[in-house]
Image (cartoon, helix red, strand yellow):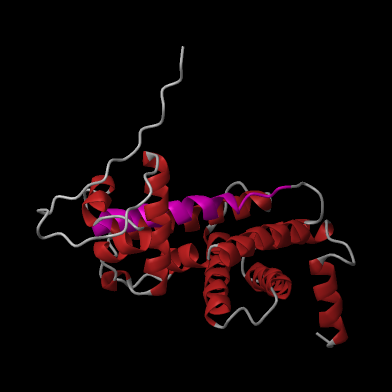
Amino acid sequence: MAATPSPVEEPVDDSPAAERPRRAAYRRLPVQQRREQLIAVALELFAARPPEEVSLDDVAEAAGASRPLVYRYFAGGKQQLYEAALRSAASELTTRFTVRTTDGTPTQQLGAVLHGYFDFVGEHAAGYGALLRGGSVVETARTSAIVDDVRRAALRRTLRHLGVREAGPRLTLLVRSWISVVEASAISWLDEGRQIPADSLCAWLVDQFVVMAAATAVRDAQTAQALHGWLQLETADSPAGVLISRLRDLGL
């Protein structure tokens, strides 16, 4: 039995023939491919300009489509398209929090996760910027929830990576605060033209986590116990081992 071909879109133009301007013909795409294209174009535009300054006409023009065609895929207009673009960026970013290997010490593995994260930031700067910059008049409870979901996933996976099942309030605050540092660093890294090499930035952020954990351990028994366990697994040439050695060299 022959396979059913993928549906393809039909050109949409509801303007009277005498009124509509001539526009270049666009290539017909399968439905899902066109939807993904519109989302990708929207991410680029929303990241480059404040979302409230981007119109559906801008998206349609950049995608080589018509405004009615954009509405066919996103009947809720720009708000629906904006939310779909954020979900797309959030979904891919969340996959980067997974530890790909069990090799290495805890801080080596944390560094590997950060490298995956910054690979995404570097490859998808538009999507990352649109996802995390916020402050837009089109921001709603739904868009805020999309960003919060990414942060909760980062919290859960960081704690799981560190072998913590039930985190108390101070340990939770530690990880949440560190995630905020990572986010702010990534945005600044993009804004400043990526002047710091990604490897160096990831190493610095691992050091930040160790130092923040040490400061929290002074006041929280759970963090102290967890940190002691992590450091027992570190080696002289692991990120934590090198950091401790350098602090000693400084007389600290």
Q: Is residue 208 left or right of residue 56?
A: right
**Which residue is located at x 53 percent, y 55 percent?**
93
Q: Nearer the viewer, residue 4 or 154?
A: 4
The answer to whether any part of residue 25 appears in the image is yes
The prevailing secondary structure element of the residues shown in magenta is helix
Left or right, 173 with respect to 148, comes to: right
Front residue of 138/159: it is 138
Vertical arrangement, residue 193 with respect to residue 238, above or below: below
- The x, y position of residue 59, in whole percent, is 32, 62
Q: Nearer the viewer, residue 95 or 55?
A: 55
Please tell me which residue is depicted at 58% across the width and 63% down the height of the picture.
Answer: 123
The stretch of residues the image draws in magenta is 77-100
Camera-nearest residue between 83 and 171 = 83
In magenta segment, residue 84:
yes
At a point 72% along the width and 62% down the height, the residue shown is: 111
Residue 174 picture location, percent across and down: 57, 66
Residue 223 image-quadrant placement: bottom right
Q: Residue 16: where, in percent of width, then height?
A: 9, 53
**For residue 49, above or below residue 152:** below
Q: Quadrant of the C terminus?
A: bottom right
Q: Is residue 225 visible?
A: no
Residue 191, given in percent of the width and then of the height, sits at 52, 80
Q: Is residue 167 left or right of residue 70?
A: right
- Residue 236's place in the image compared with 17, above or below, is below
